[in-house]
Amino acid sequence: MFLKKAIVLAAAGAFLAACRHGGYTVEGACSGLSDGDTLLICEAGDWSVCLDTAIVSGGKFYFEGAADSMSLCVVRSLGQRNCSMPFVLENGKIKIALSDKPMQSKVSGTRNNAKWQLLMDATALYGLKIDAFASSLYNADLSHGERMALMDSIAVQDSLFGETVTTFVRKESDSDFGRFMLVYFSDFMKPSEIEETVAAMPKKSQAHPEVRALLAKIKGKGRR
């Protein structure tokens, strides 16, 4: 289920200049990493696509650039895979507290990242349980019944995750962020829920190419 620009901690003048030009800045502090460690910003859906890098300095890191549109990315440690944080890449002042301990990383600063953090807080436990159940499946000593029970447990957590995401997207249906989340999390929603959510959106959002493509996709599946 769930990355764009960097360089070491920059001077305040560069920070202000980026803001004046309408770009984004990402200021971060990290725990569990050492000075000289490399951080990457990658696409959320494909960690192999690196958009930029940074070097930790004084326990901090800094990114800056310009975003043409809202996208979901992840800042992650090159050496410690569990040290990562998904966030909404958008123009504005973004702040990230990056930790090597699960559930302790946080993002804030822009309005949409504050909303994203709320969604992560609401779904984090489901993700942890799914990971735990999935890891247990590798136990070669499990009986068929035990393996099936784990699969059922994963399905329950996946369903709860989907319900939480659907509720969140519907609540944000009148915003660009809600549209963005609808497209990103559409695989966790039923076709009827997607159609109902789109119907509640402003006409501008309904006409967005990604939303129209999503509706065409689910209608195409219904015909097969």
Image (spheres, rainbow, N blue to C red):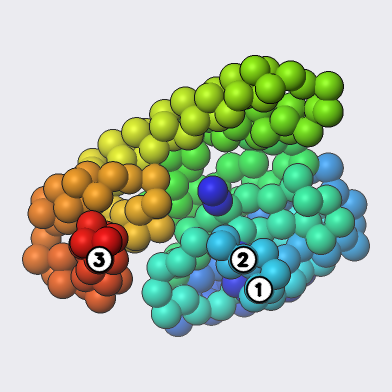
Label 3, on which residue?
A: 220
Name the residue located 49 percent from the left edge and 61 percent from the top edge.
72
Does 42 sit left or right of 65 as displayed? right
What is the count of numbered marks?
3
Q: Secondary structure at mark 2?
A: strand
Q: Secondary structure at mark 1?
A: strand
- Residue 78, given in percent of the width and then of the height, sits at 81, 61
| Upstream in sequence: badge 3 or badge 2 | 2
Q: CA separation, marks 3 and 2?
A: 26 Å
Name the residue located 15 percent from the left edge and 65 percent from the top edge.
206
Asked if residue 125 shows in the view, the reply is no
Mark 3 or mark 2, whichever is nearer to me: 3
Mark 3 or mark 1, whichever is nearer to me: 3
Estimate how packed mark 1 is, as few (under 14), some (14 to 19) or many (20 or more) residues with alpha carbons within 10 Å. some
**Quick check: 213 above or below 133?**
below
The circle drawn on residue 49 is: 1
Label 1 amino acid?
A: Val
Image quarter where the C terminus lies is: bottom left
Q: Please say if the residues under marks 1 and 2 sit with CB atoms less than 8 Å apart.
A: yes
Does 204 sit left or right of 153 as displayed? left
Picture quadrant where residue 218 is located: bottom left
Name the residue located 34 percent from the left edge and 60 percent from the top edge.
183
Q: Which residue is at the front of the view, 168 or 197?
A: 197
Asked if residue 216 shows in the view, the reply is yes
- Residue 125, given in percent of the width and then of the height, sits at 55, 27
Q: CA separation, marks 3 and 1?
A: 30 Å
Q: Please say if the residues under marks 3 and 1 sit with CB atoms less than 8 Å apart.
A: no
Label 2, on which residue?
A: 46
- Residue 90, given in percent of the width and then of the height, sits at 45, 67
Q: Secondary structure at mark 3?
A: helix
